[in-house]
Amino acid sequence: MIIKFYVGYYSQFHASGDNFAGTEWALRHLAEAFASLGHEVYITGEIVQENALNGVIYTKDYNVGSDILIALNYTHYIDLISENSYDKSYFWIHNTDPFFYNFYKGEDIDNLQDKVFNHPKFESVICVSKYHKGEFDKHFPNVPSIMLYNAVKHIEKSDKLIIDDSYIYISHAERGLREILIHWRQILYHRPQSSLYIVTPKYGEKFYEKHFSYVKSTYKNVYYHGSMSKDALITFASNKKYWLYPSNYDETFCVSAVEMQMLGLIPITRLRAGLKETIFNYIDFDSWLSCVLSNDNFKMLTNSSTSHLNVYDAFNPKDIAKNFININVMENKLKIDAVYVITFDVSDEAINRYTAEFNKLGIIPGEFHLFKAIDGRNVKVDFDWSLYSSWKIDNHSNSYYNRDILPGEIGCALSHLSVWKDAKKKNYDSILILEDDFKVNGEFPAKEIALYDWGLLYLGRQKIGGDIDIQNELYIHPGYSWLSHAYMLSKVGIQRIIEQNFEKYILPVDDFIASTYSNNNERSDLTFIWKDMNAYSLKESIVSQTSNAKTSKTSSNSFASNIYLTKDVDKWSSMYINPALKNKEYDLIVDEPIPDVLHLHAFKKEFCNEVIRLAEECGKWTKDRHYYYPTHDMLINEFQLHDAYDMFLNTYIYPLVKSNFVLTGDKWKKFSSENFIIKYTPENQGHLSLHHDDSAFSTVLTLNDEYEGGGTWFSKQKKLVKGEVGELTIHPGQITHRHGARPVTSGVRYVLVSFIRQVY
């Protein structure tokens, strides 16, 4: 590939130059990286001397032929360079105010950017950070843009003896130097060995001389060095300790920040704008200043664990060049504004996993979001919503339609709705929505879809109703379909789905989406949903689901159970609690088989069976939670049952315990619970040795009876308690009631244990 850079209006650019600003260095490093990958690379513009260096040819010939033209900062290239000399162009910008320059040789040319952005060979603007792209997109929402970090050449970390309390300021003097000088005398008073070294770019020397010439004669231990070549600057900075930059200027990238970190200097700055992406470990300037002026040790404010190699890896010129090449070789790939993965897991490991799977699609995203899924049992959204009150149809032949909407379906629907709202707010033209259990089975066929004015496009689905053929080997108009784990929305699709006001009648999202373009033959009540979505689907799904509760908690049926519906405590209790306990008839149902050990029938069998099912579907058993007496167990919060069970304890058990044991005073007002399910088997863990619990009191709920042996043995009292299904034992945790679990000789024993502790 032949790549041509136009350096813009920089009159001293040449191969042997060594006194450029950060923008020009980034261009040079990227050009050399392209050359090292085997591409033919030219730099043209106001070139002082024509020659070649590191595989890059420097030429005054604007019209040397190329596949790609990358023009830097100045829009006048569109008139200066013949469009016949390149196949497509990119406009590489580095600033925000202004984003680019519309002048040439002193002449200002109004609206020249329109000619650039509307040119048939123009591909996109290149921004140098996510922050930069976000700002550009706000101002020019209809102009395509991509993000490509600046390339920064590797610098070896210095092994020189570092001067303690040495600070170097490397920037134009207007970007924060005055704020340092305002406090410098106070800094010296508290730390008299401090020294400040000032280096400015060549284009900032006149400004410094005009506005800061007084510094030399006014401030002690402040040294001005003007501009320096790159090599000289690296050598000079290599024995300094801190890179000091308190700027309120909105950096889009800041090459100096990256270079100084590679060299081993610790940044002291304000983390704003693009610096959030280029600075790894730092000291906040205002915190540093406060510490210095109060004689506190500010070294504790930083974590210097990041290697200079970590910094280099993020901006390695070859990797940056490869990223750009990947964009261009994917001409036949679909480009979309954003990908959303709805998931409860938003860790760095998760984004790596989801990104790797998504990349198999061959779709090019502008942005990639992990969208934190909404828990249907504990909904937190920033908009009002209500359930579709007519969802449940009594005696419907399909059991799916004759039950209440489940918490998983509520959370799933609200998660998708929140994504649509976010996409609308960000004015995206196209988005792909994936649920966390998506599995890619093939590449997306991009070219064909451009033929259709689609609003919704399924990449995977479960066909319910009849499809409509459109005489295309890849696509069809889908009939009524289920599954919302992989679909795309266009700008029109986003608008139309938002206009449905789904928040006013939340129902399972599969049915809602399908009802925007098709009728449901099993229920006529959803006809109020407008059928204005122009829907398409791939004939053969290319995205499936792994579809089990271990890997996904975001789909409509993940951990599906009425056991989570605790908003109506009375209704929940009627479903699962022993009626006598529900009425708190403690004197009638509570036995004391051993002194200070209470025993009662608490739950119906349905509750116990459901808990076992949910635990086994979740499958996150562990032996690592308890150091001294480990059990084969799982916190019930792993399958989101903690809140429901905590409600049960607060409503029925804590009042019983307070009354029975006469617990009075402030320290018995509140309790917290650690709730976990234990699984005993002869092969894995058949018993538990004698021990005390880490609790004020404990409860043991018997969940099943398909086993032999088992039970809780109280050693001092020499008594065994072995409950029936749904029965609960309550006993003191420490001192008086040492206990253990008798061996299970066959079968599997499940118990739900709670360690109850005071909160005061």
Image (spheres, helix red, strand yellow):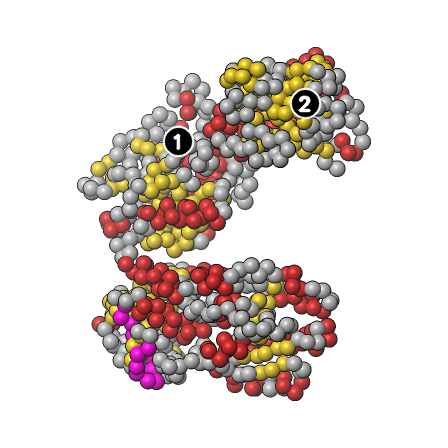
Q: Which of 121 and 729 is in front in this view?
A: 729
Residue 510 lies in the magenta stretch: no
Q: Residues within 10 Å of mark 1 (few under 14, many from 20)?
A: some
Q: Which of 753 and 605 is in front in this view?
A: 753
**SS for tag 2?**
strand
Tell me where residue 483 appears, x and y as whole percent.
37, 35
Residue carrying label 2: 739
Quarter containing the C terminus = top right
Tell me where residue 67 appears, x and y as whole percent.
25, 67
Image point (55%, 25%), residue name: 685
Q: What stretch is highlighted in magenta?
A: 39-53
Q: In this view, does 481 lie above or below 61?
A: above
| Kind of residue sitting beneath label 2 | His
Residue carrying label 1: 526
Tell me where residue 350 appears, x and y as whole percent.
46, 46
Give the total number of marks visible in the rendering.
2
Check if mark 1's residue and mark 2's residue have beta carbons within 8 Å.
Answer: no
Does any portion of residue 288 appear in the rendered image? yes
> Left or right: 236 with respect to 102?
right
Quarter containing the N terminus = bottom left
| Kind of residue sitting beneath label 1 | Leu
